[in-house]
Amino acid sequence: MLRFQNIILEMIATGVSLDVTAERLCHEIELLLPDVACSVLRVERSGLLYPLAAPSLPAIFSELVAGTMIGPNVGSCGSAAYLGEPVIVTDIDNDPRWTGFKEHLLPAGFKACWSVPVENAAGVVFGTFALYFKQKRKPNPLEEKLVSACIHLCAIALEQHDRALERERRASIDALTDLPNRSSFDTALSRLSCDEPGTWALMVVDLDNLKTINDTFGHQAGDELLQNVAQRIRVNVLPDHVFRLGGDEFAVILQEAGAVANLDRTASHILDAVGSVTSCSGHMIQPRATIGGAALSPGDEDAETVHRHADFALYHAKETGRGGFVRYWPGIGTAIKKRIEVIQDVDCALREGRIEAYYQPVIRLDTREISGMEALCRLRTPEGNIVSAGAFHQATTDVDVAAKLTQGMLALVAADLRSWLDRGIPFQHVGINISSADFHSGTLYDRIEAAFGRENVPLKHVVLEVTESVYLGQNDPVVAQEIKSLRAHGLRIALDDFGTGFASLTHLLTVPVDIIKIDKSFVSQLRLDNRSIAIIEGLLDIARKLDIRVVAEGIETEDQAYLLGQIGCKLGQGYLYSPAVAPAPATELLLNHAQRSGLEKVEPIDSLPRRPITGQPLPPETGTGKTNGRTGPDDTDFAAARAV
């Protein structure tokens, strides 16, 4: 044994090529072990297998193995490399790991195989050494001793080879994160078998806040963030492989059975790992990621189909709510296509000036005077029809379109307010809804100040309305910080749709607002014996102590208005008073019903006459996109488009 070790070491020292050295190693072992065949395989960092030497195995077998992605069921060598431990198969014919390879090996008389992974100094598997037997058996002590020596020699030869090929290797490795790059991913993906559905899956991971980090703390901090996130993903998906596709996007090829079987759990582990606070260039940063995933399914023609499905899922996840995971389902492509069409329609309407501002009055319940207005976005079709926000709410999932809608609505509302001021109409304020995308732009206050400054409209007339889902629905620290900053500039903030499931009263302690707008779902259920009245009454009491005004939304009947007044609610809006109307009729409403004194002079509500409680709804409004007069899903579900 010492003789063959010296032969191999001399070949390595004198720079003999790796494949020739591996071939000689196999030849020497086969001389010592008759009826045993050897193989040496190289494992790329991307997880692909490449035979270096297998002199006694069928050539077609080596050709089949070349470029195969390692995995838990890829023969003995592919499995050993994937698991990082020796794999002994005593019956190739009946072992599931050999299903895709045995037909090219059994005719040569080989019935068993023992493969051992070869690790580099860092403990990473970068090769395998295997013995093939013509009997169904395990290795004997002599064979174990010889293989132990061969593993050491293979490691030396492979490390020498790696150093010599480092420059070439860099072509397939991302220099920043040290992960396999897009080229490696494409190659690895093309080598995956699509014969058995459910055997592998693909996840595409998008780092959400890289641009913000680069803009705020500099590109060095952004680079460190990418490096930290890359390693966190890599560690949490072992023994599977992660690739950097470019920019802020990573891909994970999953083959571990548990990870593939429960993609939601796997994604949750990745999101938890990525989301931990990390230090980058002296700044404490909390990364956020969004993941789309797809498993190999029946009917998938090739691996690229699975990749396309994962991309669809990622797109859907990013557009419907960043920070989570979406798994591909049939039909998601249709949904995405529809969303893209809506985005294109709204973008066209913006270019052609077909976005309009409508206004719904906010009423003093005691005097029926108009205290303020809420601006709502409407789209005029090329045929002249007015479309409410619910019909095109998906457009605001596109950050650019959402920003354009905001900018357009700011300009329209500012011009209308200037007109009302010029006519001496004593309105108090107009509520303008703000989307999540607006908060993340980093320029929200500057845009608001510029839009109203051009029309010389004081910002005291502006109330920014934020829906619960935007306020703190996703625990977004950016939104919370921006709300505090806007209030510090003197702007008032209204929390819209309060009670729909995201915000809680405790949030008001850390992210205070000036106005709470009770969601219509509470108002619609108002009865003397209904729990809604107790909830609203309790909220009114809390808001009064916190010096927060309250507006009840979706008032449809006199009974609802009366009950609200009885429990101390002073402001409301809804179809009972007026739907959202165009600027001209909104001006008439203000001329006839605008409040001319402050809220501090509101008469006691107890002085109002009592009315019977009938609970009868008013007839539905036509032509406004509302249901039975409610400020319905077309408005409440579409914060960005309906105003701003």
Image: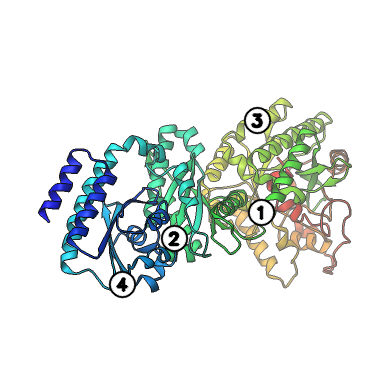
Looking at the image, do the residues carrying marks 4 and 3 touch, with CB atoms under 8 Å apart? no
Near mark 4 (Cα within 10 A), the count class, few <14, some 14-19 or many ≥20, is some
The residue under the point 51% across, 50% down is: 204
Q: Give amino acid for label 2.
A: Gln
Q: Secondary structure at mark 1?
A: helix
Specify the amino acid type for callout 4: Thr
Residue density around tag 2, few if under 14, some if 14–19, many if 20 or more, within 10 Å: many
- Asked whether the viewer can see residue 287, the reply is no
- Cβ–Cβ below 8 Å for labels 4 and 2? no
Comparing 156 with 65, the one in front is 65
Would residue 195 appear left or right of 238 to someone viewing this image?
A: right
| Mark in front: 1 vs 4 | 4
Q: Report, in whole angstroms, how far the alpha carbon at label 4 lies from the one at label 2.
A: 24 Å
Image position, residue 97 (x, y; %): 39, 67
Query: Which of the numbered marks, if any, corresponds to residue 449?
Result: 3
Using the numbered discs, state the Cα–Cα distance from disc 3 to disc 1 in whole angstroms: 40 Å
Which residue lies most toward the left here?
2
* Tag 2–tag 3 contact (CB < 8 Å): no
The image's mark for residue 255 is 2
Q: CA distance from mark 1 to mark 4?
A: 46 Å
Element under disc 2: loop
Q: Decide which of 272, 198 is in the foreground and name it.
A: 198
Q: CA distance from mark 2 to mark 3?
A: 53 Å
Q: Nearer the viewer, mark 2 or mark 3?
A: 2
Residue denoted by label 4:
90
